[in-house]
Amino acid sequence: AKAIAPALMGMTVMRVLNMSNNKIGAEGAITFAPALQKMPQMRELYVDRNDIGVDGAKALAPSLRVMTSLEKLWVHTNNIGAEGAIALAPALERMPHMRALCLNDNDIGVDGAKALAPSLRVMTSLERLWIQTNNIGAEGAIALAPALERMPRMLELYLDGNDIGVDGTKALV
């Protein structure tokens, strides 16, 4: 990520960037995040499976705030936890055109789900949401339910591995 960050700074018209599965960690995310701020027309961003953690999520958040045209975002399998989800939530709230959001396997928990819920309410064009294996439990499912009701275009919803139980299921139905 350090090596390509300077080159990315000049690519202001980029529409798709795939940095998936590159082991960049938090340091890599911190390094290339400023370049992303210069790409407001980005449509698809893939930063999954990089173990960026909380610090990487916090570094990406300001960049994501300018990407209001983003349609696809993959941040899964990065160990961002609740704190990372909380950091990303305000940026996601500025993305009404989002069609596919992949946040699974990040252990965001109940607090992360509650933070993301207001952001998801804005994403009325969302067609696919991967939020499985995040330990959101029933309370997290209950928090997300009102946002999911506002998504008439939803084609795929992945909530498996979250222990939502009967109460969470009832809220979603």
Image: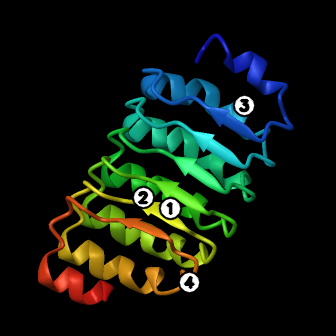
* Of the two numbered discs 4 and 1 in the rendering, the one whose residue sits closer to the viewer: 4
The residue beneath circle 2 is 86
Quadrant of residue 90 within the rendered picture:
bottom right
Pick whichever, 22 or 56, lies toward us: 22
- On screen, residue 62 versus residue 119, left or right, reads right
Marks 4/1 in contact by CB < 8 Å: the verdict is no
Marks 3/1 in contact by CB < 8 Å: the verdict is no
Residue kind at label 1, given as amino acid type: Ala
Lower sequence index among marks 3 and 2: 3
Quadrant into which the N terminus falls:
top right
Quadrant into which the C terminus falls:
bottom left
Gap between marks 2 and 1, in whole Å?
5 Å
The residue beneath circle 4 is 152
Q: Position of residue 7 (x, y in %)?
A: 77, 17
Q: Which mark is residue 35?
A: 3
Lower sequence index among marks 3 and 1: 3
* Of the two numbered discs 4 and 3 in the rendering, the one whose residue sits closer to the viewer: 4
Residue kind at label 4, given as amino acid type: Pro
The residue beneath circle 1 is 89
Lower sequence index among marks 2 and 4: 2
User: The residue tagged with tag 4: helix, strand or loop?
Assistant: loop
Q: Position of residue 116 (x, y in %)?
A: 44, 67
- On screen, residue 17 versus residue 139, left or right, reads right
Q: Which mark is residue 109?
A: none
Q: Position of residue 47 (x, y in %)?
A: 52, 36
